[in-house]
Image (cartoon, helix red, strand yellow):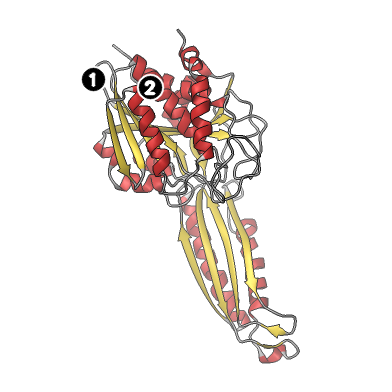
Amino acid sequence: MPIINRIADFADDMTAWRRHLHAHPELRFECHQTAAFVVDRLREFGVDEIHEGIATSGVIAIIEGTGGGPTIGLRADMDALPMDEVTGLDYASTVPGRMHACGHDGHTTMLLGAARYLTETRNFAGRVALIFQPAEEGGGGAEVMVNEGVLDRFEIAEVYALHNAPGTPVGTFYTTPGPIMAAVDTFHINISGRGGHGAMPHETADPIVAAVGMVNAIQTIVSRNHYAQDDLVVSVTQIHTGSADNIVPETAYINGTVRTCKRGVQGMVMARLDQIVAGQAAAYGVQAELDYEVGYPATINDSDRTAFAADVAREVAAEVIDDAGREMGAEDFAYMLEKRPGAYLFVGNGDTAGLHHPAYDFDDAAAPAGASFFARLVERALPLG
């Protein structure tokens, strides 16, 4: 029987799992209830090994195939976001200030669906490592798992992951070789001037004027300092200063984000920010300090594995786009792809609210498609002799 038909048989179970997870969101590394739910399902399915407490609340489960072979890693993230839900759904979040607004409840469900099928059939030679990861939304749970040695410990040879895509029809997959998501960095600029009366600015060293000069100069990094065909975003997202109309403040604060796909571009931005902050501070007679935080690296798909994964997706999908281009969001699965070849793909979530929106909801019709992709990928990557 075609794999998608068997998974479709328990689609209602997957919907129930997903909606339970949606109603009980957890944040960052504290995904203990979610992990317990995952472990209960894995035990029901009869997986061969379950390893808990990885990266605080992560789970890795092993399914042995029929005969020896390498190990394929399949990853799903489990954590939610610190925001209130406005959907009004029967299964809406029961925890104020927490919501599955990025579909990680659906990602976990897709991997559980694949686990159930693969445990039933074992139509592959080798092993599958199911990676249920906490703290994708800040915290870098994937990096923690890598640093704890899971890729070596479980001899994982390749890794794959899926993310839902609002605005793309359910049953459509898309990906691209090479960088598919950007590195994400954060910068903080603290400016110290000399405050005073707003009517006597000549007696002050105005941090507001310096901040405005810095922000205007920062805009030239993209427009004048980088090659136009290299992906780059530099956005100033916060300026905080001042308290009254007749006071020149002592300090100002600037914050922003940098998104890059190449290390050379990232290095250029870091150097230019240093130069701009120092130069503008000197020009306006203030002191300024730049704090540049390097975050998740770029998510870079292996070209051969991406082509293979797209070919697998064509067996279970209505449409597959294998050269979709890059997105400037970030994803900590990048840390796993730095250590092992693999691919990151998107699966359509239909006409829903966007990611990180308080009205977002994962489309349960996407779960069988994602589970079928994971399962068929294993069977294709680890064929029986």
In this view of the protein, which residue sits in the foreground, 170 or 193?
170
Specify the quadrant that holds the C terminus: top left
- For the N terminus, the quadrant is top left
In this rendering, is residue 75 above or below 63? Answer: below
- Of callouts 1 and 2, the N-terminal one: 1
Which of the 4 image quadrants contains residue 317? top right
Which x, y percent locates residue 221? 60, 60
Q: In this image, 158 relative to 15: left or right?
A: left
Helix, strand or loop for disc 2: helix
Task: Report crowding for label 2: few under 14, some 14 to 19, many 20 or more residues within 10 A (C-alpha).
Answer: many
Give the numbered dot on residue 166.
none
- Residue type beneath disc 1: Gly
Residue type at the position of mark 2: Val
Mark 2 highlights which residue? 378
- Residue at (37% x, 37% y) in the render: 36
Instruction: Report the residue at 71% width, 80% height from top.
Output: 244
Q: Which residue is mark 1?
A: 68
Residue 294, position as x, y percentages in the image? 45, 57
Marks 1 and 2 sit apart, C-alpha to C-alpha, by 14 Å
